[in-house]
């Protein structure tokens, strides 16, 4: 009998095959996989907890592999949010959840968990939050699900998935000044649109990617879902390993060399981007894919700037903001809100003098949390107001009143805009 020829696999397919106990998998195949880490936050966990308790199981599948993070409405802004937080707190205590993060030790979940060394290459992470795809920056398969699915995972440690087809994004060349990961992903979203990668894996490669910082990689993976992607993933390399060895001294690179796509892996599509031709990007209301170059923006006065979120709340983002805001003042009548992503980032920003720069400029610095990104609190917009946000979404009513407007950018554009009172480039300062 003639032996069947087996094509190579992408990195996404390899991780899924490993977690379902099969030698190979292919796009479209339905598989049951084991979950290495399950997570939820103060908004999504309550529903998951109710589902879990309705299953009739005695215990969670693994109290060391469930992360519960208080990050959306914290510190609690009202009685309903306080009740949600208490429900999670009580559940964590009742079931001995080891990865429970309370206010004071918590922060934006998708910055916090990598910082704690909980995500490693080749792992499979499922979260009740759409931006769980962030962890693909570390070479993990990570994706978001609904709270109902997460509740079942808490009891079983498993989930059914359909193997996604892959789209390869080749990015080559050196990035110009003021262009970062946020600009790359916004530009890509402009190409793909809101649903151009529905249930696909976005795999990033090229010379630009090889030299890209982890902060920029996290930003890009984070927004893969904004074009409908199931996950966004970077094959781990020396930059990945240096990051992990810094936070996990015992981390070993052994057995990770094969965690890359095979040369004969099949892709549904390949997209080539010349990084040298990129400019800072701005997403106009009301879609992250409604993108324009900063040169095409025109004169748009703004009322508020928000720097933070799981997309751009890292120390590197605050450093960019500090380099622009140093010695300058926020435009009269404009509100600049800055939320460091975690207590560790807050502490490092304090040590480096960044918080002094922000305060002298006229910014308000808030607690490590999601804050206004999702219209939670700490910066809600009124009717008719405009904001520049380093967050990941600008849907209608995303940050407040349905008749407000949100423009997305990286920290460089956001900081310059705060100074000039309109959407602007640092080159204008």
Image (cartoon, rainbow, N blue to C red):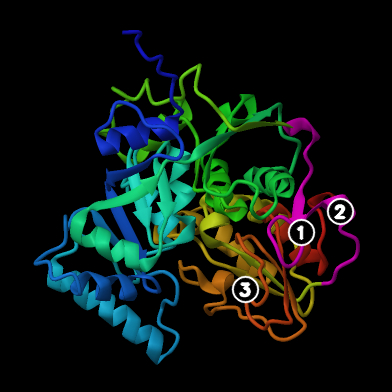
Considering only vertical position in the picture, is 219 above or below 396? Answer: above
Q: Which stretch did the figure color magenta? A: 274-301
CA neighbours of label 2 inside 10 A, class few (<14), some (14 to 19), many (20+):
few
Residue at x 64% of width, y 67% of height: 306
Residue 231 visible in image: yes
Residue 299 versus residue 317: which sits nearer the camera? 299
Horizontal placement of 48 versus 392: left or right?
left
Horizontal placement of 296 versus 41: left or right?
right
Residue at x 28% of width, y 44% of height: 33
Residue annotated with mark 3: 398
CA neighbours of label 3 inside 10 A, class few (<14), some (14 to 19), many (20+):
many
Horizontal placement of 206 versus 233: left or right?
right
Secondary structure category for the residue under label 3: loop
Q: CA distance from mark 3 to mark 2?
A: 29 Å
Q: Give the x, y percent position of residue 1.
A: 31, 8
Q: Residue furthest bottom?
A: 79
Residue annotated with mark 2: 428
Residue 279 versus residue 9: which sits nearer the camera? 9
- Along the polypeptide, which appears first: circle 3 or circle 2? 3
Q: Which mark is residue 22?
A: none
Q: Nearer the viewer, mark 3 or mark 2?
A: 3
Residue annotated with mark 1: 416
Horizontal placement of 74 versus 385: left or right?
left
Q: CA distance from mark 1 to mark 2?
A: 8 Å
Q: Give the x, y percent position of residue 315.
A: 52, 51
Residue at x 41% of width, y 69% of height: 71
């Amino acid at each position: 009998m003639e032996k069947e020829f087996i094509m190579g696999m992408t990195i996404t397919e390899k991780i899924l095959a490993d977690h379902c106990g099969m030698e190979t998998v292919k796009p479209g195949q339905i598989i049951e996989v084991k979950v290495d880490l399950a997570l939820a936050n103060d908004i999504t966990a309550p529903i998951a907890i109710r589902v879990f308790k309705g299953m009739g199981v005695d215990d969670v599948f693994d109290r060391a592999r469930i992360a519960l993070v208080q990050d959306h409405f914290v510190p609690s802004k009202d009685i309903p949010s306080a009740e949600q937080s208490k429900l999670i707190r009580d559940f964590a205590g009742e079931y001995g959840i080891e990865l429970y993060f309370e206010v004071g030790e918590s922060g934006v979940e998708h910055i916090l968990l990598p910082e704690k060394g909980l995500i490693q290459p080749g792992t499979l992470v499922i979260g009740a939050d759409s931006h769980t795809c962030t962890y693909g920056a570390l070479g993990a398969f990570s994706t978001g699900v609904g709270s109902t699915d997460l509740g079942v995972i808490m009891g079983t440690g498993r989930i059914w998935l359909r193997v996604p087809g892959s789209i390869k994004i080749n990015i080559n060349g050196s990035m110009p000044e003021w262009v970062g990961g946020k600009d790359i992903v916004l530009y890509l979203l402009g190409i793909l649109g809101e649903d151009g990668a529905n249930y696909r894996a976005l795999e990033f490669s090229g010379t630009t990617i090889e030299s890209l910082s982890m902060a920029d990689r996290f930003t890009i993976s984070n927004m893969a879902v904004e074009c409908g992607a199931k996950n966004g993933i970077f094959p781990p390399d020396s930059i990945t390993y240096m990051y992990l060895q810094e936070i996990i001294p015992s981390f070993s690179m052994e057995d990770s060399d094969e965690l890359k796509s095979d040369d004969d892996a099949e892709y549904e599509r390949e997209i080539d981007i010349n990084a040298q031709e990129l400019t800072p990007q701005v997403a106009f209301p009301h879609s992250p894919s409604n993108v324009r170059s900063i040169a095409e923006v025109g004169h748009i006065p703004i009322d508020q700037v928000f720097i933070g979120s799981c997309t751009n709340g890292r120390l590197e983002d605050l450093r960019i903001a500090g380099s622009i805001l140093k010695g300058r003042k926020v435009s009269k009548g404009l509100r600049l809100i800055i939320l460091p992503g975690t207590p560790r980032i807050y502490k490092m920003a304090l040590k480096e003098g960044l918080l002094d720069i922000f305060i002298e400029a006229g910014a308000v610095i808030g607690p490590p949390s999601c804050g206004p990104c999702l219209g939670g609190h700490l910066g809600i917009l009124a009717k008719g107001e405009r904001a520049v946000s380093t967050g990941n979404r600008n849907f209608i009513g995303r940050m407040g009143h349905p008749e407000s407007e949100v423009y997305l950018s990286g920290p460089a554009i956001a900081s310059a805009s705060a100074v000039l009172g309109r959407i602007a480039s640092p080159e204008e300062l």
